[in-house]
Image: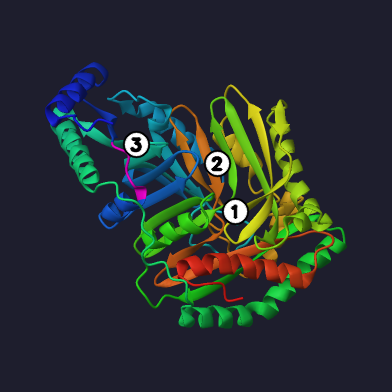
Amino acid sequence: MKNDLNLTDFLKDVFSSFDKKVENSGLVSICVEIPCIDLFQVYELLINKYPFSSFWEESDGISYIAFEKCKYVTLDGPKRFEVAKAFNSENFKNLINLTNESHNSALSKIIYLFSFSENLNNKNLPSDIPSLEAILPKILITKSDKNCWLRINGHVEGKSSLRTLIEEIWTIRNQVINSGSKLIKSSGLKTSFDSPYINDFSRSLETSKTDMKKLVNRGIQLVEKGILEKIVLANRIKIKLKNKFDLVEILKRFKKKQPNTCRYVWKRNSNDILFGASPEKLFSFSKPNLTLEALAGTISTNSNFNKLLKSTKDLKEHNYVTQYLIKSLEVLKITNFKKSDTKVNSFGDISHLQTIIFSKVENICPFELLKNLHPSPAVCGYPKNVALDWINTLESFPRGNYASPMGWVDSSGNASFLLAIRGARYVEENIEFTAGSGIVSGSVLEKEIDEIKLKFESILKQVFFVKSPR
């Protein structure tokens, strides 16, 4: 922790590095270590200052807050993973670090959000979500264990604009340090029903129940006829927000009630915010360790876990995901992997079958991994392309960012991506909730409907501060 660092010495060190590394102008990055901070408190401090922000917090791993765009690309067409790879390579090639990173976790990062699919064959349901959003943030605060770093990226033209950039990071540093490191308080957590929202949810669910049953029934028929082995079908409910939207309080509740998830936010602007608490990490790569996660098969946390471990239907659903991940690694010529035992892991009210796949690799392109892994049978189905076509045909809405990859890649090629599930999208004072279930042979209509309802409720009561309506 560099609490005793002074601006004069910091300016001197950065200017000296600039003289050695930069001719006169260029894309530069400046990093300073800061005392360990409460991410929620800092996010609350700065969230309204910048139109764009992103939040990523996990209990065991790297967490970050990002503000404003230094460099970015938005894509509405195909080849999103190729475009992301090119953006990644170009910007890290041009980015000149003027300070030394004392820790791998402090490295420069580019953050990414993809759509679930490119929807090229679904012209009747155009999405307002781009295929790709890739951003080198202007301001990045990173936390790992009890270490924190503040980074600023920007294009400079000579020492005058460099000094402006240094003064900006120094101002933010002082704001963050002075904000203190208070413990997260649970004030605002309510345990009573918020009746208007419960009523809105119940009405919306009842209205959509007929269509939901038709949808799930069609999925069951496709599996029974042998057209598909598995398909994941989703439903969407929209609820008008009557109170102020307090994003940070929702994130705090996610952390308290679902501590082993990854809390995530992608705030395009104050009227368009994707947020949630994902239980599913698609993959993480911290050289040389590559970790993939199979998560499928669902039960209420209040139930007997042995029931899930002995469920033929759920084990079958889970096995499709595990085998798909292994085949994806083999396509990338990664064969030296190990697989954990399948266990039940709890994420708040919901528990899932989970299998971890480990491998050691010298290097791997994160975007090649994404191209091969997404969408997995956990959120799509099997065979993948056939399931994807049926999802686009049967679902009455474009998925957008639901079940899509979100994550980061650093300047050394380390990366981490989750699937944006167990969340919602705030749009123009409405909140859209999306949840789905996996259908395989042995699926029963009412049980699949109950699973979708359980997933809706798990998010609803964190957003609207309520107990389960059950």
Foreground residue, 132 or 257? 257
* Residue 181, numbered circle: none
Point out the image quarter for the C terminus. Answer: bottom right
**Residue 23 visible in the snapshot:** no
Q: Residues within 10 Å of mark 1 (few under 14, many from 20)?
A: many
Measure how far apart labels 1 and 2 are at the Cα level. 11 Å
| Magenta stretch: helix, strand or loop mostly | loop
Above or below, 334 against 247 in this view is above
Kind of residue sitting beneath label 3: Cys
Foreground residue, 124 or 184? 184
Q: How many marks?
A: 3
Q: Secondary structure at mark 2?
A: helix
The residue labelled by disc 2 is 81
| Residue drawn at point x = 45 percent, y = 70 percent | 465
The residue labelled by disc 1 is 117
**Residue 466 visible in the snapshot:** yes
State yes or no: residue 426 in magenta.
no
Mark found first going from the N terminus, 1 or 2: 2
* Residue 148, numbered circle: 3
- Provide the residue span drawn in magenta: 35-39
Kind of residue sitting beneath label 1: Ser
Say left or right for 64 vs 318: left
Measure how far apart labels 3 and 1 are at the Cα level. 35 Å
* Between marks 3 and 1 in the image, the one whose residue lies nearer the viewer: 3
Q: Residues within 10 Å of mark 3 (few under 14, many from 20)?
A: many
Measure how far apart labels 3 and 2 are at the Cα level. 30 Å
Kind of residue sitting beneath label 2: Phe
Mark found first going from the N terminus, 3 or 2: 2
> Where's residue 51, x and y in %?
30, 56
**Quarter assignment of residue 386:** bottom right
State yes or no: residue 38 in magenta.
yes
